[in-house]
Amino acid sequence: MSAHAPTREHLALLVERATDGGIRAAEIVDSDESLAALGVSSLSLLRLADGLESEYGVLIDLGDRALYAEGLAGLTARVRRLAEEGAP
C-alpha cells in the first residue's frame, strides 16, 4: 500500500497512466464529468482499478459506480474511505 493519502491529483495521474496518456491528468483534475463521459474506456477502467489496488491496497469492483459514473471527486472519496477502513 502507498504511504500517501488518495488525492484527486494523484488519482488523475492514475487515470492518465491507465489511458496511456490519452486523457491528461491536468485536463481532468478539476472536472466534474464522469470518467465514462471523459472517454475512459472499459479497458482503461480495468487498468485504473488495478492501479488503485497497487497504490492503495483497495479493491474496486468494475460495477462500482464510483469507478466510472461519479467522476474523479466521487472516486477519490470512495478510495479514501476504503483506504481508511483498510478494507478491499
Image: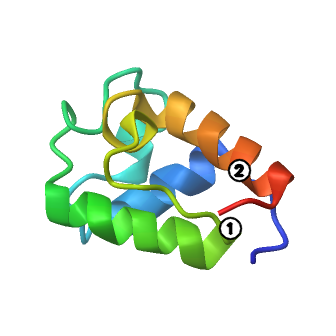
Closer-to-camera residue (20/53): 53
Mark 1 to mark 2: distance in Å?
9 Å
Q: Nearer the viewer, mark 1 or mark 2?
A: 2
Does 63 sit left or right of 3 as displayed? Answer: left
**Residue shown at 22% from the left, 36% from the top:** 38
* Mark 1 residue type: Tyr
* Mark 2 residue type: Leu
Does 86 sit left or right of 41 as displayed? Answer: right
Contact (Cβ within 8 Å) of mark 1 with mark 2 = yes
As helix, strand or loop, the secondary structure at mark 2 comes to helix
Which callout, 1 or 2, points at the residue further toward the start of the chain? 1
Q: How many marks?
A: 2
How would you rate the neighbour count of disc 2 (Cα within 10 Å): few for under 14, some for 14-19, many for 20 or more?
some
Q: Residue 1's spot in the image, x, y percent?
A: 75, 77
**Residue shown at 39% from the left, 64% from the top:** 48
For disc 1, the marked residue is 56
**Residue shown at 84% from the left, 72% from the top:** 3
As drawn, 49 above or below 84: below
Residue 82's disc number: 2
**Residue shown at 39% from the left, 57% from the top:** 15
Q: Residue 68's spot in the image, x, y percent?
A: 31, 39
Placement of the C terminus among the 4 image quadrants: bottom right
Does 14 sit left or right of 86 as displayed? Answer: left
Q: Residue 5's spot in the image, x, y percent?
A: 80, 56
